Amino acid sequence: MNDFMILAPDVKVALGAGMPVVALESTIITHGMPYPQNLETAQAVEAEIRAAGAVPATMAVMGGKIRIGLEATYLEALAQAKDVMKVSRADLAVALATGAVGATTVAATMICAAMVGIKVFATGGIGGVHQGAEDSFDISADLREFAETPVTVVAAGAKAILDLPKTLETLETLGVPVIAYGQDAFPAFWSRDSGLPAPLRMDHPAEIAAAHRTRQALGLPGGQLVTNPIPEADELSRDMLSPLIAQAQAEADAAGVTGKAVTPFLLQRLFELTEGRTLAANIALVKNNARLGAAIAKELAAP
Ligand code: PSU
Ligand code: MN
C-alpha cells in the first residue's frame, strides 16, 4: 500500500476480512462505450458481482489518487468526463503526478489490483497484437503485464479486431497461461470461437483458483488469462464481423490512426457498422465475465 491509493469503504472492509473482491477496469467505461450505456454497464457489472457474493472494485485515477472502488458519484462523473486519459503502465505515475482524470486499462488495473492484494479482475477483452504489427509494432502493454503481475484476469479472449494468432503466440512467449473456460477454443470476444485452439482448458472456478495459488506457491511471477466465451444467445457471427473488421482496420490505416487511439477507433467503427450490435454483445460478455470472476474470487477467498 502507498499514499496514492484510496480504497472505497466496502472494498477496504472486504480486503481486511479476506472476503472475495473483483477488480474492474475503467477504460471500457471512458473509451470503450458511449454514455449512458457505459454508466449503465458499469453499474450492472458491479451488481452482478455483488449478487454473486463478491465486492466489485472499479479502478480509476482521480485527483492524484488511484481510487480502488468507485462510489456512485465518482462512477457517474467518470462516465461523463471528457478528455479522460487512457492510463496504462507507462502512464500511471504521470497521471497521478499531474492530477489528471485517468481510466485504467487492463495493464494498469492489474497493477492497481496487485498493489492492494486483489487477485481477480474481470473485463471485456484484453489488448493484444494489432493487425499489421509487423510494420506498426503495435502490441498492447496488456500482454507483458500478464508476465509480471499476479492477477487472474477473466476476459472473452482478446478483441476480435486484433491479430489473434500473433496475440496467442506472444502470450506463449511471455509464459502466460491462457486458460479457456469450459471449451477448447480460444474465443474471439463477440464470437465464441476464434477458430484457434486455446493452449489450456479448465471447467471449474475451483481449478482456476488452484492454478492461481499454485503459480504463487511456485514463485512464478505473473498472472493468468481465463477466456470465457460470450453466452450463445448474445454472440455475433465471425462471418458477419470479419469483413466489417477488415473495413474498420482499412479506415484506421487510411486515416493514420496510431498508438492509444487505435483500439477506441476500431471499437467505435464496429459499433457504427453493426448498428450497435457489437455494443450489446460487449455488455453481455462483460457481465458474464463478472459472474465467473466472482466465482473464482470466492474460491480464492475460501480457507
Ligand atoms: N475491451 C473493450 N473496450 C476497451 C478495452 C478493452 O471492450 O476499451 C480497453 C482495455 O482497457 C484494454 C485496452 O486494456 O482497451 C487496450 O488498449 P491498447 O490496445 O491501446 O493497449
Ligand atoms: Mn497499442
Image (cartoon, grey):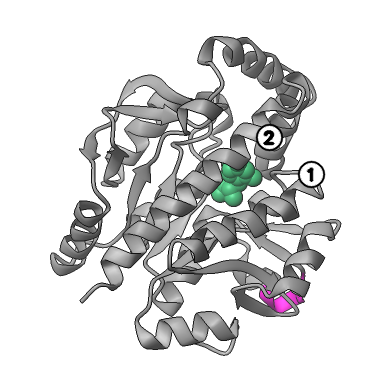
Which three-letter amino acid code belongs to the residue tagged 1?
Answer: Pro
Q: Is residue 170 something that shows in the picture?
A: yes
Hey, which quadrant is residue 280 in on the image?
A: top right
Q: Is residue 133 something that shows in the picture?
A: no
Is 204 drawn above or below residue 65 in the view shown?
Answer: above
Q: Is residue 300 magenta?
A: no
Instruction: Give the extent of the magenta segment.
Output: 96-100
Main secondary structure type of the part rendered in magenta: helix
Q: Residue at x 63, y 63 (%)?
A: 91
The C terminus, quarter of image = bottom left
**Percent coordinates x, y for residue 221 in the rendering:** 27, 62
* Disc number for residue 282: none
Q: Is residue 98 magenta?
A: yes
Q: Which residue bears the numbered disc 2? A: 279
Residues tagged 1 and 2 counted as in contact (Cβ below 8 A): yes
**Percent coordinates x, y for residue 75 in the rendering:** 73, 67
- Numbered marks: total: 2
Q: Which residue bears the numbered disc 1? A: 34
Which three-letter amino acid code belongs to the residue tagged 2?
Answer: Leu
Pointer 1: residues within 10 angstroms few (<14), some, or many (20+)? Answer: some
At mark 2, the secondary structure is helix
Q: How far apart are marks 1 and 2 (CA)?
A: 9 Å
Pointer 2: residues within 10 angstroms few (<14), some, or many (20+)? Answer: many
**Percent coordinates x, y for residue 140 in the rendering:** 52, 43
Q: Which residue is drawn at 50% across and 62% down?
A: 51
Q: Which residue lies furthest to the front in this view?
A: 51
Hey, which quadrant is residue 296 in on the image?
A: bottom left
Q: Which of marks 1 and 2 is nearer the N terminus?
A: 1
